[in-house]
Amino acid sequence: MEWSSIPGCQVDVPVVLRGLLDPEAAQTAERALDWLVMSGPMSISAVMPAVVPYLLRLAADPSLPRRDPLVGLLLVAAALSAPTDPDNAWDLAVGGPEKDHPERAQCRAAFVADAAWVQRLLADDELRADPYLDDEDRASFVQAARL
């Protein structure tokens, strides 16, 4: 992938992703990743759709040093990539019109393309037992991946 071709993307994304595997660097890599994939408190950046496939694969690994925060970031991506209802003033005020945020549709497409990895997360016994991943969170994953 040519990371530098994505608006606002740093070319060191692979270093950040590899850092998520290192128990000593995972927390720092996670903070760097947050800066890369979020363009504001309630919006994803153009980088998010490109990293979703990598994050899904990483989150499916129960031995990942900081798995829960990564699953949480994927939940944020799923929720914030949901289409806005053009007839809902609140939705438009918070998320803006779809035409102004192509990264949302791209992120949904990434979840759909990797729906098998989403299914793996949803079927993971460890995550299923975790109260952190409740029914609403699962529904968000299902909707994003169109399962």
Image: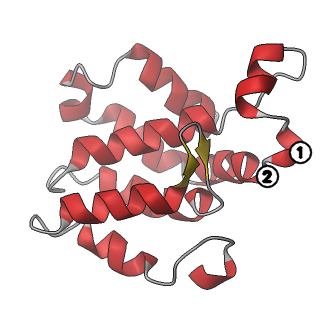
**Is residue 75 in sight in this rendering?**
yes
The percent position of residue 112, horizontal first and vertical second, equals: 63, 46
**Is residue 2 in sight in this rendering?**
no
Instruction: Say which element carries label 1.
Output: helix
The percent position of residue 36, horizontal first and vertical second, equals: 49, 63
The residue drawn where x is 24% and y is 63% is 28
The percent position of residue 7, horizontal first and vertical second, equals: 69, 72
Residue 35 vs residue 21, the one in the foreground: 35
| Mark-to-mark CA distance, 2 and 1 | 6 Å
The residue drawn where x is 71% and y is 53% is 103
- Horizontal side of residue 53 vs 65, given as left or right: right
* Image: 31 above or below 16: above
Residue 100 vs residue 68, the one in the foreground: 100
Locate the C terminus and report the quarter of the image it occupies. top right
- Residue underneath mark 2: 102
Q: Which mark is residue 99?
A: 1
Locate the N terminus and report the quarter of the image it occupies. bottom right
**Disc 2 marks which amino acid?**
Pro
The residue drawn where x is 62% and y is 56% is 45
Which corner quadrant of the image does residue 81 belong to?
Answer: top right
- Horizontal side of residue 94 vs 51, given as left or right: right
- Horizontal side of residue 61 vs 83, given as left or right: left
